[in-house]
Each structure stands twice: as C-alpha cells, then as structure tokens.
Amino acid sequence: MKRLENQEIDKSGAARPLTIVDVARAAGVAQSTVSLFFRDPSRVAPKSAEKIRRVVSETGYRPNLAASGLRSLRSQIVGVMVPSLTEFTGAAAVETLQAELRAANLQTQINLTNYDKQSEADSLEALLAWSPAGIVLTGTDHSQGVRIRLLEAGIPVVELWDVSGRAVDLTVGFSHEACGAAMFDHLYEVGARRFAFLGTRLDLNVRAAKRAKGFMAAANARNCHVELFQSSVGTSMPYLGGVLAGMAFDVVDGYDAFACSHDLIALGALFEAQRRSIRVPEKTKIIGFGDASFCTSTVPSLSTIAPPSKEIGIVAVRELTARIRGERSQRRVFDLGFDLIRRGTT
C-alpha cells in the first residue's frame, strides 16, 4: 500500500491537501468505496475498510463534506453515539438531549455502536466527516485511538451516563459503582444474606460491569459472598433473566436476593420465581436498574435504581452549547447522582 504524507506536492511544487482520490489510490480501492466508508463503514467489506482505516490513521486525513454543498450544516450537527436503543437504559437521556438540541437550533445525528469499540471508532470517523459542532458519547471507556481523534478534532465533547474514568472534555452522569453498592446495601438492610448478581454481556457493557463490581465490593466489606450469573448475549432479556435466575434457584440452598444489571433481567427473574411458586419478596428479593415504565405494573412492583436521565440530557446540552459558543468552565465532571426506588420486590 502506497504511503501518503499529510500533503501531496502538485506539479507546481506547492503542497496541496489530500483528497478522497488520494486515499482511494493509497488504499487500493474505488473512490466510491472510500466515500461509502465515511458515510457508513458497516457497509464496506472488512478488508477494504481496514485498508482505508490504515490510510486515514497514517495521514490524519479527514474529508470535508461541508465543501460539497453542505457547509450550512457544519455548525448545526451534533453527533451522538449510543450503544443500543433497546438495551440502553439512557434512552430517555438521549431523547431529552435531542429535544434540547433542537431547541438550540442544533440537529442530532445518532449512531449505534452495539457496545463495540471498533464500531465506535468507525462511527466517530463517519461523524467527523460532517465537521460536527460537537460530539456526544456514552461512557468514558473508549479506545486510545478514539480519544486521540476526539482531541485532534478540537470540538466540544460530552460523555454521558458515567462519571468514572478520565473525561476527554466533560462528562455528565453518575457513578455506576455507587449504584451497585447502593443495591447491595438495600438488600442487606432488608434481611438478605445470600446474594446473586444477574447480568448480560458484562464483558462489553462496561457500565453494567461497574455496577456488578460495586455490588461485590460492598458485599466484601460486610464479609458476604456474591455469585455472578451472566450471559454473553443480550437479546430476549426477560427470557435470559429467567434463565439466569433459574440457574441460581437450582443451586443448593438457593439465594434470597437477586441484583440485576437491567430491569428487563429483573423482570425475567421475577417471572421465573413466580413459575416456581417462590414468593417475592418473602423468599427472594429482586432489584433492577433503570426504572423502566413497567416497574410499577409488575406484581409485586419492582425495586430499582432510577438514573437522572432527563437531567443528564439537560445538563449535557447546556454545557455543550456553552462550549460551542466558546464559553468554558473549570468544571469537567457533573455527577448528578441517582435514586434507589424501594418497591414490592424488596
């Protein structure tokens, strides 16, 4: 593969910026393939995408789509990256974010990463191609390459939903470790002594993994043991919650408390308890995370952690738009806390 420098020399001897044609030639692919990569990397064959990615990495090339008649959109697009629309408990925060951005005359472009760091990196490249006014990401756990690209871009960056880790620019959210500890403390206070944590894709969903970590740390502080039951997939979550709870119920002596990574997992655990005629909360207590709308409709109603979703969206837009205007404050972390909602399952 031919190596390109950041600038080529034209016939007159003057340096000129790289173009998409140069990238295509260096990567050995068609110009249309490079154009598609910057619009939607998932539609490009993996081998071709890797070649293009390597050229972009070596040269720092970034296309200016605003030059193609889209210049008027340059300062009105905010790129937003979220892991999922079905499993992500911060969807309400994103809805609020979009509404607040619209009120500020900014448009939202949402990309899904499916908890995958390479997908996040590809989505970032696609977003940067549009010269966005700002970038919003989920969490603070990113690859080093993504962190470098965000810093190089020189635009406002907000990381939502988690305040642990090192912020690129600023982060708005809460501590997931503290959520896990609060879940344990509540279960312990209401008499539970044999604990299980149920979760899915904890290897990818780092925020759920942090809640599990916080739960176990709080248990260790009281000399209590926690058994972790997890699944590597994340679809059909109530079904998986039932499967995981069933595995726990089958253990000799069982467990008298389940902490769940998601309200849908907790819902499945509650269904499994009812299928086995195990009384909740008398024999087994259950707590979830997210405060989904169905939590008040289950019988008994579901105890859970309620994150400040709308507040996160409001504060994120307030700080992002201030940065877009060139206003910067010394504060980089906005920890908005959370509420533990005590309902019938505990």
Image (tube, rainbow, N blue to C red):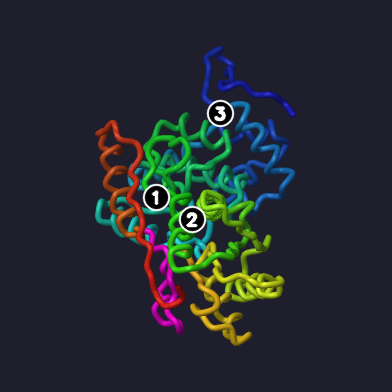
Whether residue 228 appears in magenta in the rendering, the answer is no
Q: Secondary structure at mark 2?
A: helix
Considering only vertical position in the picture, is 197 above or below 31? below
Apparent side of residue 76 relative to residue 302 in the rendered image (left or right): left
Residue located 40% across and 40% down the image: 157
Q: Secondary structure at mark 3?
A: loop
- In front: label 2 or label 1: 2
Other-residue count near label 2 (Cα within 10 Å), few / some / many at <14 / 14–19 / ≥20 = many
Identify residue for label 2: 180
Figure quadrant of residue 117: top right
Residue located 71% across and 50% down the image: 45
Q: Position of residue 19 (x, y in %)?
A: 56, 32
Apparent side of residue 38 relative to residue 174 in the rendered image (left or right): right
- Determine if residue 69 is in view: no
Q: CA distance from mark 3 to mark 2?
A: 41 Å
Quadrant in which the C terminus appears: bottom left
Other-residue count near label 1 (Cα within 10 Å), few / some / many at <14 / 14–19 / ≥20 = many
Quadrant in which the N terminus appears: top right
Identify residue for label 1: 174
